[in-house]
């Protein structure tokens, strides 16, 4: 089958819109008879906004990234799962991980940008607070030493009283 005659199946497009890439590849393989690698490349090309069935075609114009006000309100209420669902409804090609990253960016006060949402980069990440004091190896040697000292003091106190 020549590459220019391959049409992207609508069932595969629907599976891809739901975020089921594997299912989309299986549908493409079943309907076109392509090998796994070529079917996967075709699904990737379609997902990236390229015209299905044309190899080497440039990327077509993609829909802009939309963060609906209802999703922003859900983030403000602390309903992050609802916000992710609303964001994915407004952006059908958005996968779950990217939607979660965009909601996290809103939670941390950064406006999600199309490129930033895809790369997961936040403009101003918050600094991490160290959880271990410098020089602490996390061993319990000091605890053992303290117990020995307390026990020795207790024994001395008992022996002096007798």
Image (cartoon, grey):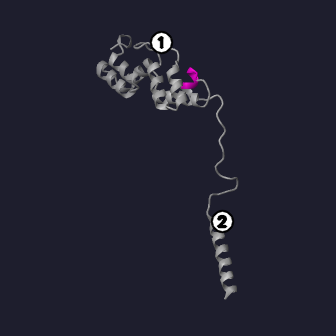
Please indicate whether residue 146 sits to the left or right of residue 27 in the image: right
Cα gap from disc 2 to disc 1, whole angstroms = 67 Å
Q: In this view, does 138 lie above or below 43?
A: below
Question: What residue range appears in magenta?
Answer: 112-117
Labels 2, 1: front one: 2
Residue 110 picture location, percent across and down: 62, 26
Q: Which of marks 2 and 1 is nearer the N terminus?
A: 1
Q: Is residue 134 magenta?
A: no
The location of residue 151, given as percent across then percent down, is 64, 76
Q: Are marks 2 and 1 in contact (CB under 8 Å)?
A: no
Q: Which residue is drawn at 65% across and 78% down?
A: 154
Decide which of 106, 142 is in the foreground and name it: 106
Q: According to the image, label 1 marks what residue? A: 57
Give the residue pinned by disc 2. Answer: 142
Would residue 149 be seen by someone viewing this image from the given angle?
yes
Count of numbered circles on the image: 2
């Amino acid at each position: 089958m020549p590459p220019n005659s391959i049409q992207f199946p609508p069932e595969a497009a629907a599976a891809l819109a739901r975020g089921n890439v594997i299912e989309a590849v299986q549908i493409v393989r079943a309907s076109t008879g392509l090998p796994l690698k070529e079917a996967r490349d075709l699904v990737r090309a379609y997902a990236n906004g390229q015209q299905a069935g044309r190899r080497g075609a440039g990327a077509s114009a993609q829909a802009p990234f939309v963060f609906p006000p209802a999703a922003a309100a859900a983030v403000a209420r602390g309903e992050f799962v609802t916000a992710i669902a609303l964001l994915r409804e407004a952006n059908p090609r958005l996968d779950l991980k990217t939607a979660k990253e965009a909601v996290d960016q809103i939670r941390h006060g950064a406006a999600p940008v199309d490129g930033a949402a895809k790369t997961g980069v936040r403009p101003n990440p918050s600094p991490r607070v160290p959880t271990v004091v410098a020089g602490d190896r996390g061993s319990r040697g000091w605890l053992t030493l303290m117990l020995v000292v307390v026990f020795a003091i207790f024994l001395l106190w008992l022996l002096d009283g007798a």
